Image (tube, grey):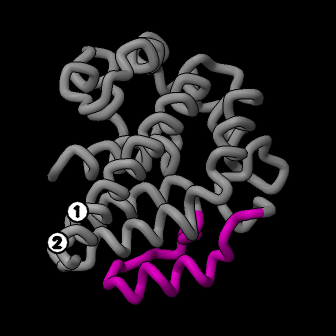
Amino acid sequence: MNEFSILCRVLGSLYHRPPQDPILTPLFALLREGTLRAQWPLEQDALLQRLEQNAEPAALAGDYAALFVGEQCAVPPCGSQWPNGPQEAEVRAFLTSRGMSLGEAPADHIGQLLLAASWLEDQSQEDEYAAQVRLFDSYLLPWCGTFLGKLEAHAQTPFYRALAGLSREAIQAMREELAEVETAAADRGA
């Protein structure tokens, strides 16, 4: 698993699952121990320190629920709930066409989209970067800036405010990396 995949997997998991989910226990342990920061591929130490200092799942559960859960949540986590976001069926069709197995959870959920980016990165198909570009440009970037801004504004805990900033910078860095791959591929084809 490369750096791009790790970023997407960590961020996607923190959005996709409530903090008290047992699957996140090892990730929260890495945060509390400072181990994740030592292995994080981007220079985001200040934001990661804020996550580490506030990585107590029990203390985050109420904020997570108020932010992301239910019809009256403060920050809807699905792209289809935002003016520039994609429709869930369109995202599901795209990911399924790429061979990704999806459960019943919404395919346009911010966490699912980041996990899908990791999954696409881990695939060995020659056109993986083209699929990632489409995922970012069509299904994630049109609405995630607004989503992350609203998350920063509505989060009651420093953890989720820091997660929004960390996500914004990481998503931008990953898209820039994809642009470099696109340019290199175009140069090889010229």
List the single residue furthest toward the right. Answer: 72
* Residue 122, image quadrant: bottom left
Residue at position x 58%, y 28% in the image:
160
Report the residue marked by disc 2.
Answer: 188
Residue at position x 35%, y 28% in the image:
28
Q: Where 138 falls versus 41 (above or below)?
A: below
Please tell me which residue lies in front, 151 or 33.
151
* Residue 150, image quadrant: top right
Q: Position of residue 68 (x, y in %)?
A: 68, 46
The reply to whether the magenta stretch includes residue 88 is yes
Range covered by the magenta-colored residues:
84-108
Question: What count of labels does the image hold?
Answer: 2
- Is residue 23 in view? no
- Is residue 18 in view? yes
The reply to whether the magenta stretch includes residue 149 is no
Q: Residue 184 got which mark?
A: 1
Q: Residue 56 got which mark?
A: none
Please tell me which residue lies in front, 23 or 50.
50
Q: Residues within 10 Å of mark 2 (few under 14, many from 20)?
A: few
Q: CA distance from mark 1 to mark 2?
A: 6 Å
Q: Position of residue 179 (x, y in %)?
A: 36, 57
For label 1, the SS is helix
Amino acid type for the residue under numbered disc 1:
Ala
For label 2, the SS is helix
Q: Where 33 falls versus 18 (above or below)?
A: above
Q: Position of residue 169 (x, y in %)?
A: 47, 34
* Residue 81, image quadrant: bottom right
- In the rendered image, the quadrant that contains the C terminus is bottom left
Please tell me which residue lies in front, 164 or 178.
178
